[in-house]
Amino acid sequence: MTVEGSGIKHDDVLPSSIHSTLLSMGPRYNMAIEIAPRNALSQPSLDSMTHAPPAQCMRHTKVPTLAFKNAREVDRYVATVVESLIRKNNSAGLRTVLGLPTGSTPIGVYRELIRLHRDKGLDFSNVVTFNLDEYWPMGKESIHSYRRFMQETFFDHVNIPAENVHIPDGTIPLGDVEAFCEAYEHAIEKAGGIDLQILGIGRTGHIGFNEPGSPPDSRTRMVTLDPVTRQDAASDFFGDENVPLQAMTMGVGTILGARKIVIIALGEHKAPIVRRALEEPISEEVTASFLQTHRDATFAVDLAAASELTAMQTPWLVGAVRWNPPLEKRALIWLSQKLKKPLLKLEARDFVEHRLHDLVRDCGPTEAIRQRVFNDLLGGICTRPAGNERQKIIVFSPHPDDDVISMGGTLWTLNDQGHDVHIAYMTSGNIAVFDHDALRHLDYVREFHTIFGMDTEPAQALCEKLSHAITTKQSGDFDTEEVLNVKTLIRKTEATAAAKTVGVGEEKLHFLELPFYRTGKVSKRPISDEDVAIIARLLREQRPGQIYVAGDLSDPHGTHRVCAQAMIRALEVVKPEGIVPEVWLYRGAWQEYEPHEIERAVPLSPEVMLRKKLAIFKHESQKDKALFPGHDEREFWVRAEERAKKTARIYNDLGLPEYYGLEGFVRLSGQL
Ligand code: F6R
């Protein structure tokens, strides 16, 4: 069956839950579908996390696109597609040929498939796999090799026979690469072609390592990696200078030869390229756009990765919508910004001329709409974010600097207004400390012992040992536990100094060091009961009236996302004990909430902004150049200042009062 207009075929590999969701949307879902406002992202009520429909079909995309409320749902969907295919083939005595990706995106799918194997008896003994790519040169045992990644992440945990696994070999001498690639193509052919190809998408729009410029008929070959791709891999390699310049990859033509393709995109940092791949014309500049030519390709994305699609940004431009207050707010801000007119100056014909007549019909008259949105924004500006009564407040900071970067002004304000403000640092952030910084601190310890005539020998010996561990480390290798401790200490002392700058004393700081983060690597463990228990214990001890949590859906390594999940679980644990604080979400260093999402805006005066900057400066190890700057080269204090000023400017342009800076927050709603 095909849902009209979507191009999505509901054959037996589409999970029944999604099948029924689509059916419930009506035969012409593209006429009736209700697009969730982006606010749904920023208000992860527990209710919506557990009961919301599993997927929305996006309108106006050139490849069928299913948007799921979070990464976990995407993982489950993709794993179910794989599972259904394998079970169908197994029962017909056929083998299943899978094309597999690496990277951060598919990890959840592999975890889910392992679970299905372990708990539901999913049998992989008749599965053949072909991986998309491998860095070149690359030793098979290297911590960076895709071979090792696949073994550790997937193959070691399921029963795919070793001889059925194919991965490009990064140890092949240059002269033999061409022949190897040809043989790889033959092996795919001999296996009967790929039944199901799973893909991720790079920020350059690459599929496999088919960087911009790769033609649609390209086959398996050696390629040069794009600088953006190398920058994205830099964190895994501890510096982009360690990322190989080349890789072997299946070609675009090889990928398009698969009978079915599911491409996954997770996180806001993928949103711009997802939009280009799905809404712009096919081009070699975005090789994922070639999927528009495939007869059975589907994008499976989370709401964050879908957030720049027209259907999410301006759904009223692509069809009928069911208006609600968040959507009304979004549309009005859009109209005001588009016309460069303050909200209260928008006129009836502005609505009509910009496809908002339905809004006027359903929610009008015009003056009521603009006044409602204006009042909502004005009412959200709040100079006393915790009210007049003294309250206990905990700010949860995923890394040691998110608190001051994202809400340093509010932190100071809360303190200044007499509240009992605590800060809980959820992880040590130790992997983001440069080696040279650790060495400098070791020098300091050595000199300190000498200057004060202390028992220098053990200290000197330890410093020597640690320096040796750092300087003899192979580029991109992990640190030893002891070196990680030094790096943790550096970040801890910086956080303590920064907290003091915004008025929070050392006795009110809680360094939680959640276990999920303690791998010493960029890749982390999934959250465990232990992580949740640590947070729950703090909530029990402190019984805060208000808490602040980083509500990020995507940061470069997913730490914020994991911290937010752990927080939500901890709040569920303590709720029956009567601990139900007011929860406000703030954005981490990477983005601010968009104006239509912001429910509370806290003003910053020039003096408070300066204090916030001084606090950020205390994070010296992250200054000048952060080890993991994300996709923004600006220093954190610059980002923080520009972001707060930009929000203030946006409010002012909408016709609201003019502030020096504003910090934005969203309330966590739903039944806890
Ligand atoms: C990996 C691969 C790449 C990745 C893409 C996204 O085998 O072929 O195309 O899928 O670079 O990477 P992540 O998932 O790390 O964002």
Image: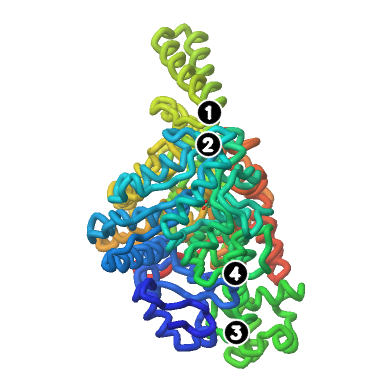
* Residue that mark 4 sits on: 293
Q: Is residue 563 above or below residue 261?
A: above
Gap in Å between the C-alphas at discs 4 and 2?
35 Å
Disc 1: which residue? 475
Q: Is residue 368 above or below residue 293?
A: below
| Colour pattern of the rendering | rainbow
Q: Residue at x 43, y 81 (%)?
A: 22
Residue, disc 2: 237
Q: Describe the element under mark 2 as helix, strand or loop.
A: loop
For the residues labelled 3 and 4, say whether their Cβ atoms are less than 8 Å apart.
Answer: no
The Cα–Cα distance between marks 2 and 3, rounded to whole angstroms, is 45 Å
Amino acid at the residue labelled 2: Phe
User: Which label sits in the foreground, 4 or 2?
Assistant: 4
| Callout 1 secondary element | loop
- What is the x, y in percent for residue 133? 51, 47
As displayed, is residue 616 above or below residue 391? above
- Badge 4 or badge 2: first in the primary sequence: 2
Residue drawn at the location 44% of the way across and 38% of the way down: 521
Tell me, yes or no, whether the two marked residues, 1 and 4, touch with CB atoms within 8 Å.
no
**Mark closest to the chain's N terminus, 1 or 2:** 2
Q: Amino acid at mark 3?
A: Gly
- Looking at the image, which is closer to me, 512 or 180? 180
On the image, numbered disc 3 is attached to which residue?
319
| Marks 1 and 2 close (CB-CB < 8 Å) | yes
Q: Is label 1 or label 4 in front?
A: 4
Give me the C-alpha separation between circle 3 and circle 4: 24 Å
For badge 4, the amino acid type reads: Thr
Observer-nearest of 276 and 440: 276
